[in-house]
Image: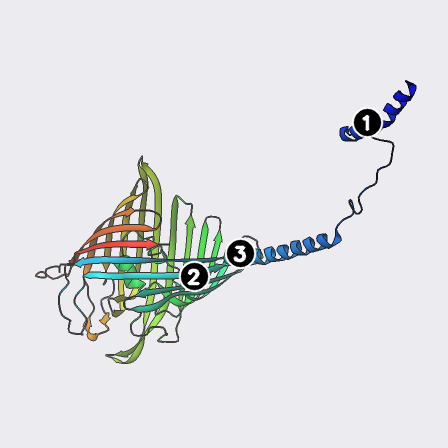
Amino acid sequence: MKKAIVLACVFASPAFAQEEADAGIASDAPTAEPANALQPDTEKIGFLQGKLEALEEQFAESKSVLSGLSKIKVSGYIQARYTYAENSLSGVDSAGNPMVKDGFSVRRGRAKIQYDGTVARYLLQIDATPSGVTLKDAEAALTEPWSGKKYLTLVLGQTKWPFGYEVVQSSSEREFPERTRAIRAFFNGERDRGVKLAFKGGPVRAWLGVFDGNGTANKGFSGIDNDTEKDFYGRLAVDFKWFAAGVSGSGGLTYRPTDASGPGRHYERTRIGLDAQLYLDLLPFGSTAIKAEFVAGRTYQSGNVEVFGQTALGWYALLIQNIGDHEQVGFRYDFFDPATGTRNAVDSRDPAKPASRNQIHTFGLVASHYFDEVLKLTVAYELPLVFTGGATDSPPKQNLFTVQLQAKF
């Protein structure tokens, strides 16, 4: 009997040992570990470390590229129009220019590339229309890094004159299809070649500039200056978001190569201006904007003709009401007197002929619908009233109706 019990214990002990091992019970007997079970695989680790370092390097390169690309902005817009002009006629005038002023057109086809770095800025803008491709802006700018707040920026190249509100306002943001008569007369093309220094600190804005003076739209001297004189510009403004205002001025000389009195001579080219913009929430269904600007000066552009030595002035008042997020309506009164003050100016086409003294009052209505942030439809009607100063003269009919579709990105 004792022998049977001993034999049973001997044969059962391996089974008990296996059960203890399965249950996780520690055993006093040492166990043999598989070879290299806890040893690191140095070959695999080295391979993975190399992969990780390569990925980190690629990420750093991609981050550098993306950082550079984030500083580049590509934008543009197209303004396609249909215009009905009451004074449009078939044929050409005595100078051979077409008298047709209505029909379909591409008024502006802008493409702009801009780079904004820490201290440098690059800006290039071209205008592609059926009449050709022209350079609008070509700016190389330096922003001072010392203050940390970028107070001063120096711009050199072809850029907008720092004068008033409508000159520097983008055509894509303007409420009416075109600028007012006074602004078009004094600042034809809105741009010139030169240098300007801009200051921005809190609500204060200031600009100083030196330019060739003729502008980019001068028909007689496009792209070059016609004399050794330079024009000086200055503007001081404040911007409190809900209210903004500024005073501007410029002075210089322009040269007329031939004159009835003999050799060419210099004519004074000066401008002075005041502007203000007020933004209110008067009505419960949208915001209201009131804008006004006054400008006066000597020597200006009348169509394709430069009028020398004559003092002119003009001003406008604009009321804009936004209705919700998609509709906008507005009214504008625009006045231009081409011959106030001195009366000894000459017409550049005929020196013996005095320049026009017609006062022009233009009443305009505009309505716009924003389909989204890209597409805007604008309908505008302008009624000019021309007072010629003659007892028997009748003001010419110059009513203008414009439908414009603008796509902007």
Displayed quadrant of residue 178: bottom left
Seen from the viewer's position, the closer of residues 220 and 376 is 376
Q: Nearer the viewer, residue 37 or 99?
A: 37
Q: Is residue 312 above or below residue 229?
A: above
Q: Nearer the viewer, mark 1 or mark 2?
A: 1
Q: Is residue 293 left or right of residue 1?
A: left
Q: Residues within 10 Å of mark 3 (few under 14, many from 20)?
A: few
Q: Amino acid at mark 2?
A: Ile
Going from the N terminus, do you reach mark 3 or mark 1 first? Answer: 1
> Secondary structure under badge 3?
helix
Kind of residue indicated by mark 3: Leu
Q: Which residue is mark 2?
A: 113
Determine the residue positioned at 30% across, 36% down: 285
Q: CA distance from mark 1 to mark 2?
A: 83 Å
Instruction: Estimate the x, y position of residue 60 in percent, counting from the top left.
Output: 60, 56
8 vs 295: above or below: above
Residue 359 placed where, x, y %?
Answer: 19, 59
